Amino acid sequence: MNRTSIRRALVPGIAALTLALSSCAAGNEAGGSNGESGSGLSGSIAGGGASSQEKAQAAWRAGFQGENPDATVNYDPVGSGSGRENFISEAYLFAGTDAALSDEEGELAAADKRCGGDVIQIPAYVSPIAVVFNLDGIDSLNLSAPVIAKIFAGKITKWNDPAIAAENDGVDLPNMTITPVHRQDDSGTTENFTKYLEAASDGAWSHEPDGLWPAAIKGGEAADGTSGLVGAVSSGQGTIGYADDSAAGDLGVVAVKVGDEFNTPSAEGAAKVLAVSPRVEGASESNMALELDRATTESGAYPVLLVSYLLACSTYASADDAELVKGYLTYVVSTEGQEAAAGEAGSAPLEASIQEEAMALVESISAK
């Protein structure tokens, strides 16, 4: 797994996304195999990272704070790269990342050092990445991975290109320049998207997957964060980009070719990919990173997806911090928390065996 070098951590205004303590009444208490999110916890914890998790985090924080009205959870959607950096630097007690920690550039070892022991890395948010576009009068298009790769690499530059037309019989495609929009920040969504292009495009994508967009590709537009990219696609004609499906809004959405089918983004399609994907080889017991099968031809699967992880320490110096992080992540992984995220962001709830394993790791969090 390729990883950019660790950069200087910057902590933007965390308070921007703090939920009011009076927000959202609690749902049913998560118990049994779902875990126990705690009752009567108090204090404040700060986290941040993947902007793809923004809607899910809002639902999780509302539910958890409803059950624990004296507790505050802050989540700053600064992007996966900054989330990992700020976790390692101890600016965050927990972090969200769309790209699992890797040892290729020392991130996993740095996180273990920050924790004074094993870092916990659990899947929490499974979501399709939508390939979104803005063309008047066209709401959907069929595109195969090689065609998508050539569009974003700048090799297909017109919407009425024969390669696009061949996959969209009967669609009146305009003679208009394509403007690809990519993320400017270090983004787990970019890393997952480029991993899909590498795996599924039959060699049409020649760049190494990374959280930073390939510098060798010239042209197009760049935007910060999920909301910035969606805004850039929405404000232009002939634009195309990629974003968490929960943020696609009213934009046109691509159905990607899987085997002999063209499949639109769906939680069910993402879950099918997860079900056939193994754990990363050599991962520790506290590291649940998955090697996604992005070239699958499984019927109904949607292989342009991300599995977004939560990072936490197995032990914290402060007992209060340990209890709050443990309580919050317990709610996130619980059936109640997963259903809340699915309702708000359209994510796929964790499969039962993955949920059980993640819950056991969360329940092991303690004070030093």
Image: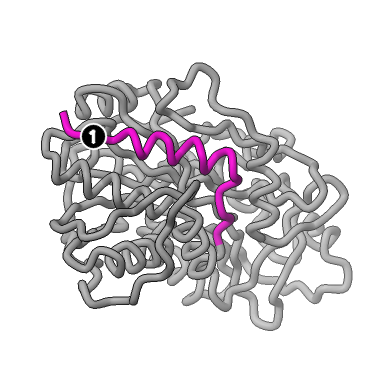
Instruction: Answer with left or right where residue 211 lies relative to residue 199.
Output: left
Q: Amino acid at mark 1?
A: Ser
Q: Give the answer, above or below, for where 298 lies relative to 60.
A: above
According to the image, label 1 marks what residue? 366
Q: Give the answer, above or below, for where 61 lies relative to 32.
A: below
> Of residues 355 and 132, which is closer to you in this image?
355
> Of residues 69 and 276, which is closer to you in this image?
69
> Of residues 45 and 243, which is closer to you in this image?
45
**SS at mark 1?**
strand
Q: Give the answer, above or below, for where 3 lies relative to 79.
A: above
> Of residues 135 and 258, which is closer to you in this image?
258
What span is colored magenta in the figure? Answer: 347-368
In the image, farthest residue toward the bottom? 137
For image coordinates 20% across by 52% down, the residue present is: 46
In the image, farthest residue toward the top? 282
**Can you tell which quarter of the image residue 165 is in?**
bottom right
Instruction: Answer with left or right where residue 99 lies relative to residue 159.
Output: left
Percent across and percent down for residue 186 are: 36, 45
Percent across and percent down for residue 120 are: 35, 33
Q: Residues within 10 Å of mark 1 (few under 14, many from 20)?
A: some
For image coordinates 30% across by 38% down, the residue present is: 312
Instruction: Answer with left or right where residue 269 lies relative to residue 152.
Output: right
For image coordinates 25% across by 70% down, the residue present is: 19
Q: Is residue 366 magenta?
A: yes
In the image, farthest residue toward the front? 32
Q: Is any part of residue 150 visible from this angle?
A: no
